Image (cartoon, grey):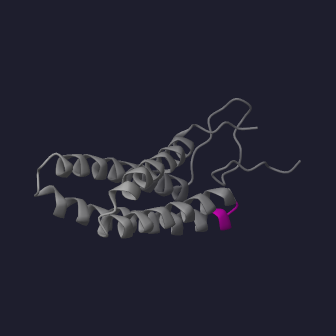
Amino acid sequence: MSAEKTAYGAPAGPAGGAVRRTGLAKALAVVVALECLSIVVQAITAGSFLNGNDSMKDVHAKGAAAVIVLALIQLVLSVVHWRKRGPGWLALASTALLVLVVAQAAVGGSHNLAVHVPLGVITFGVAVALATWVWQPRRGA
């Protein structure tokens, strides 16, 4: 009988038992959580800036760079994870997130709020969906 693999690439545990994550899966989960948190911070700094706190504009711009770097790290980890028999869709979703955050930074830099705000909501939704998935406990077969 062949050993089943979990979404995290580790052998599946006993029926109904929780499965331990590999080091790579743990790193990916942490980066996804940090990405989601950094996007929340972006929303907070944007709201503060739009409410008249001009000093938050620079914080928001620097935060965009952090969001992009985290998305790039997430993409690299998700591709490595996929190559080690992790889910391919996670690498595709991480690619989409990177494209979204780069587009978001470009649109924000052009001060087009009519696109920047809704794109930010979409980006946050994708990040939350990814964070929800990677942090769900996995069960053995």
Q: Main secondary structure of the magenta part?
A: loop
Q: Position of residue 66 (x, y in %)?
A: 32, 64
Horizontal side, residue 115 vs residue 22: left or right:
left
Tag count in the figure? 0
Q: Position of residue 70 (x, y in %)?
A: 40, 63
Note whether 80 is above or below 30 in the view shown: below
Where residue 4 sits in the image (x, y, percent)? 78, 48
Rendered position, 108 above or below 36:
below
Q: Position of residue 126 (x, y in %)?
A: 51, 50
Q: Nearer the viewer, residue 84 or 106?
A: 106
Residue 69: image quadrant is bottom left
Answer yes or no: is residue 90 visible.
Answer: yes
> For residue 101: magenta?
no
Q: Is residue 86 visible?
A: no
Q: Residue furthest right?
A: 1
21 relative to 115 in the view: left or right: right
Residue occupying image coordinates x 11% and y 56%: 54
Q: Residue at x 65, y 63 (%)?
A: 82
Q: Nearer the viewer, residue 114 or 48?
A: 114
Above/below status of 74 relative to 126: below
Bounds of the magenta span? Answer: 82-86
Quadrant assignment for the C terminus = top right
Q: Quadrant of residue 14?
A: top right
Query: Along the horizontal axis of the image, is 15 left or right of 135?
Result: right
What residue appears at the point 70 percent right and 61 percent down from the top-left corner? 85
